Image (tube, helix red, strand yellow):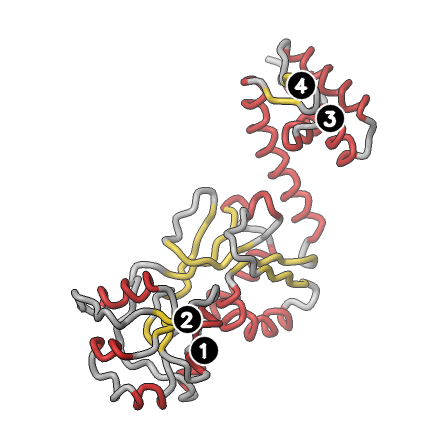
Amino acid sequence: MADILSIIPLNALRTFDAVARLNSFTTAAGELGVTQAAVSWQVRALEQRLGQPLFRRLPREVELTLAGERLARATSEAMRLLRGAIADLSEESGGVLSITTSESLASQWLAPRLGAFQLAHPKLAVRLDTGPRIADLGREGFDVAIRSGSGDWPGLESLYLFPSNVTPLCTAEVRDQLGGLARPEDLANAPLIGLDAAWTDWFAAAGVTERPPSAVGRLIADLQVLEVASALAGRGVALGSPVLFAAEIAQGRLVRPFDIAADESAGFWLAYPADRRRVRKIAAFRDWVMAAVG
C-alpha cells in the first residue's frame, strides 16, 4: 500500500500549519516569506488532494473546518517535533540552553550556581526566563523548566529537586522583640508579610485551629524574594523557603523560629519534554542540576 504522504508535499503542510495558527493567509505569507497568492494556491491544492475544505473563507480571516481542526492538531505537533529535532542536531554540543523558572528560585538558587555549569560547558550559552506565568516548553522555545508543583505535567519528564514549602523567617532582632516566638500563637502580634491565604495555610499546618484575628498580613509583594527582603530589613515575619534562603539562615541574617512548614506535598522539579530527554544540552543540564541538589 502506497504511503499517503507521498501525494502530499511537505511544503503544503507547512503552509497549512502557518495559516491554521495565524488564521490569516496574508499573515502566514509574511511568516513564510512568500506571496499571499502562493499561500492560497498551496492551501487550495491541499484541499483538492484531500477532497474536502479545510478553511471557511471569511471577509477578514479564515476559520478551520472540522476536518481542518483535525489536521491542524496533527501538523502542529509534527512541525514542533521537526523544529526541535533539527534545532537539536544543528546545535550539537553548543548553542543556547533556554531555561524558564520563577524569579525567586532564579535569584536565590539557580543564578549563583550557573557559573559552574557554564565553566563546564563553555560552548553552551544560557538564556534564563523568569516570567510570572508558566511557559509552554513545546511552543515557546524553552528547553527546560524548574517549577513548583506536583511534577505531573502531560508530555514532560519531571525530576524532583527539593521541597517548595515555606516557613516563617525573620531577623533575630525581630524574633527577640516578639518575645522569642516560642509558639505559633506568638505570631498574633507580629507584623506578618505575605498573602493572608498563605499564612492561613501555615497556621493550619501548625495546628492553630483558630487563627488569631490580629495575625493578618500587612505587606504583600508579588514575589517571595521581595517579601523575604522586607523581613531581612526588619519589617516583620515573612513566609519563605528554607531551601532558597538557606545561605541567609546559615549566616544568621535570618532565623527560622519554627520547624513547621506549609505545603509539605509540593516540590521544585526539573521538567523538560519527554521526547527530548536525550538532547545533549538538556542531558548536560539535567546531570548538573541533579548533582547540585544531591
Give the percent coordinates (x, y) of residue 222: 48, 64
Q: Amino acid at mark 2?
A: Leu
Q: Which label lies toward us, 3 or 2?
A: 2
Dots 4, 2 in contact, CB < 8 A? no
| Residue 24 relative to residue 219: left or right | right
**Mark 1 or mark 3: whose residue is earlier in sequence:** 3
Residue 230 numbered mark, or none: 1
Q: CA distance from mark 3 to mark 2?
A: 50 Å
Give the percent coordinates (x, y) of residue 27: 74, 32
Q: Amino acid at mark 1?
A: Ser
Q: CA distance from mark 4 to mark 2?
A: 51 Å
Q: Nearer the viewer, residue 59 or 41?
A: 59
Location of mark 2 (residue): 219
Q: Nearer the viewer, residue 266 or 201?
A: 201
Residue 58 numbered mark, or none: 4
Dot 1 falls on a residue whose secondary structure is helix
| Residue 126 relative to residue 174: left or right | right
Mark count:
4
Dot 3 falls on a residue whose secondary structure is helix
Location of mark 3 (residue): 25
Residue at coordinates 70% horizontally, 24% vertically from top-left?
A: 60
- Binning the other alpha carbons within 10 Å of mark 2 as few (below 14), some (14 to 19) or many (20 upward) gives some
